[in-house]
Amino acid sequence: MNKKTANLLCLLIGVIWGGGFIATDFALKTFTPFQMLLIRFAGAALLAWIPVLVKREKVQKEAMKTGLISGCFLYIAFALQTFGINLTEPGMNAFLTSVNVVLVPYLAWIVWKQKPDGLVLCASLVCMAGIGFLSLSSGSFGLRWGDLLSLGCSVFFAAQIVALGRSEHLSVAVVNALQLSTAAVLAIPFGLLEPWPAQISMETIGSLAYTVCLSTFLCYLMQTTAQKYTSCAAASILMGTESLWANIFSFLILHQVPSVMMVTGGLLIFTAILMVEGRGWIELHLLKRRSIRQPRPAFKRSGSFRCFVLLSVFLKG
């Protein structure tokens, strides 16, 4: 797999997560947020262990360490997001959660010594601005405890992405199974404290299937795979497009009319995608412009050329 394919996988994750907003909204009509976390991680963990057992892959010590750390960060991020969304506006929660797009390049620099690329860093700021337009188009801006929890959530989401930054030599299936299992174990206490519903509709079952199989198992498997071939910063930007796709699906499925701020945010996020995916074309274009501007080097006469001239003069004379 090359870097371009890995980036497309990250973009596909954003698409699936965007659709997951609608699926989660349906499921939350029956289950509480923490019950949803337990269902999604426990169900996804069971699916994640199937390829490991079928292939009889060994659980390496380093893979266990990466999976445990990533899984802890993953659950803490979701838990803080769940607490925060009850104490602040949904738009503000989504905006502060997406701050991880900007945090990831610097965390990767601190942890893995991956110096932020100028173009990717600029794309992360553009993407952040776009998410801000989308998230705050129907909400107000204010600072409260819920906002601080949402901001903490973004830090742990960024940490989870960075934790997978050096897993290129590890088994993707093993790391994914371990991180989802860790999150599932941590979800048990809060998930079992509340009474469970007696009846579940087919609509809710379909929403749970989407959340467990696609939004969790498949997406985190693709993330673990893609981050073996692309940078943490590029992955965070492309996966951060989930808010754009969520608004697109809301328009197509729920027939919600987009506002000017939503359209502006979508265009900014689309620009960020082009900056990451089209960086090869941008670099080639800049290189051509530099080559046109640079003057042609003057002809330099070598020692052998001078000897040839003297010999010609001597023969003519």
Image (cartoon, rainbow, N blue to C red):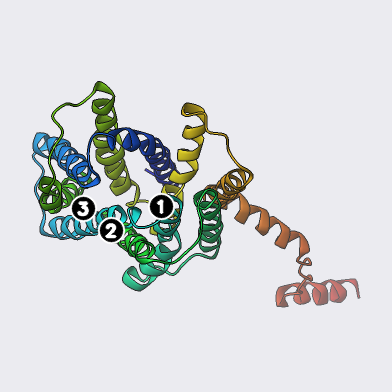
Q: Amino acid at mark 2?
A: Leu
Which of the labelled discs sits on residue 36, or is there none?
A: none
Considering the numbered disc 2 on the image, is that residue within a helix, a strand or a loop?
Answer: helix
Q: Reply above or below: 307 against 146.
A: below
Q: Amino acid at mark 3?
A: Leu
Corner quadrant of residue 157 = bottom left
| Residue holding disc 3 | 170
Q: Are marks 2 and 3 in contact (CB under 8 Å)?
A: no
Instruction: Name which residue lies at 79% across and 67% down.
Output: 295
* Residue 15 position in % (x across, y down): 42, 38
| Residue holding disc 1 | 235
Neighbourhood count class around disc 3 (C-alpha, 10 Å): few under 14, some 14–19, many 20 upward: some
Neighbourhood count class around disc 1 (C-alpha, 10 Å): few under 14, some 14–19, many 20 upward: many
Neighbourhood count class around disc 2 (C-alpha, 10 Å): few under 14, some 14–19, many 20 upward: many
* Residue 202 position in % (x across, y down): 25, 21
Could you tell whether 128 is left or right of 77 in the image? right
Q: Earlier in the sequence, mark 2 or mark 3?
A: 2
Considering the numbered disc 3 on the image, is that residue within a helix, a strand or a loop?
Answer: loop
Q: Reply above or below: 32 against 307.
A: above
| Residue holding disc 2 | 80
Q: Amino acid at mark 1?
A: Ala
